[in-house]
Amino acid sequence: MSLRQLFDLTGRVALITGGSRGLGLQVAEALGEMGAKLAITARKQYELDEAAAHLRGLGIEVLTVAGDLQQVDVAELLVRRALDHYGRLDVLVNNAGATWGAAAEAQPVEAWNKVLHLNLTAVFLLTQAAGRLAMIPARYGRIVNIASVAGLQGTDPRFMATVGYNTSKAGLINFTRQIAAEWGKYGITCNAIAPGVFPTKMARGMIDQAGEFILDRTPLRRFGSEQDLKGVAALLASDASSYITGQTIAVDGGMTAI
């Protein structure tokens, strides 16, 4: 098989949560450009409509499914909608997430629960549904979890104080390893991407407050761009990564190297 064929996603279907903007839309563009048909989800239908128009303008086939992953029954509904529409589900990208800035001693339990539910419990429910309904029966699947460098190490509070976010992303990284360990026998790989600082809506306030502090600790001396997740996302969603599972790849300009 040629290298182009290994990366080719023609005929594959990918479900991407939080796919209407930011990193999720970057990943959607990447997989769609490689030939995948997409199902993108988010809470707000108007944002999904805008993203779908953009993706269709690139020649990408896309289904939009609005849903709030804070509701425990939504995960299975999203998977079933994708299956009903396309008849298969090959790739799951767990990208939707939330954060809450507060010192650990002041973190409200309601905020802790919200962050842990969306960043970890909802990922479990969606992955479980995708595996049970689609990937395990097909004996094939690619699961890509969007973690964070905040899950790889503690964070200087001058940069950000987000104990719930850090905890959830660390949990997601080990969740990735466990799914890889359990589902390898089904031909399913599960890997994570740990982005550094990208100028998304979620990160805008942090960049405004501590941009120079962050850049001083990033060897490449820049934030992530609109292109920087595409290559690794395409790799982990395709057969080019068929012998890679349980791994976390930092895309952070070298932040975690020092």
Image: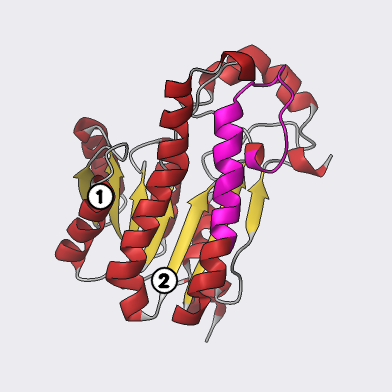
Where is residue 251? Give x, y as percent: 64, 46
Q: Residue at x 75, y 31 (%)?
A: 221
Where is residue 49? Give x, y as percent: 21, 38
Q: Quadrant of residue 154?
A: top right
- Say how many tags the image has: 2
Q: Can residue 161 be found in the magenta stretch?
A: yes
- Which comes before the other along the chain, label 1 or label 2? 1
Residue at the outermost left position: 84
| Mark 1 secondary-structure assignment | helix
Direction from residue 133 to residue 235 in the image, left or right: right
Q: Is residue 79 above or below residue 116?
A: below
Mark 1 or 2: in front is 2
**Residue with the mark numbered 1:** 56
Type of amino acid at the residue the image marks with label 2: Gly
**Residue with the mark numbered 2:** 141
> From this viewpoint, is residue 231 visible?
no
CA neighbours of label 1 inside 10 A, class few (<14), some (14 to 19), many (20+): few
Instruction: State the separation of the CA atoms marked 1 and 2.
Output: 25 Å
Where is residue 69? Give x, y as percent: 31, 40
Direction from residue 141 to residue 105 in the image, left or right: right
| Mark 2 secondary-structure assignment | strand
Q: Which mark is residue 188?
A: none
Q: Nearer the viewer, residue 181 or 197?
A: 181
Direction from residue 49 to residue 124 in the image, left or right: right
Q: Which residues are magenta?
A: 151-177
Type of amino acid at the residue the image marks with label 1: Arg
Q: Residue at x 48, y 73 (%)?
A: 183
Q: Residue at x 76, y 33 (%)?
A: 218
Colour mode? secondary structure
Q: Nearer the viewer, residue 41 or 71?
A: 71
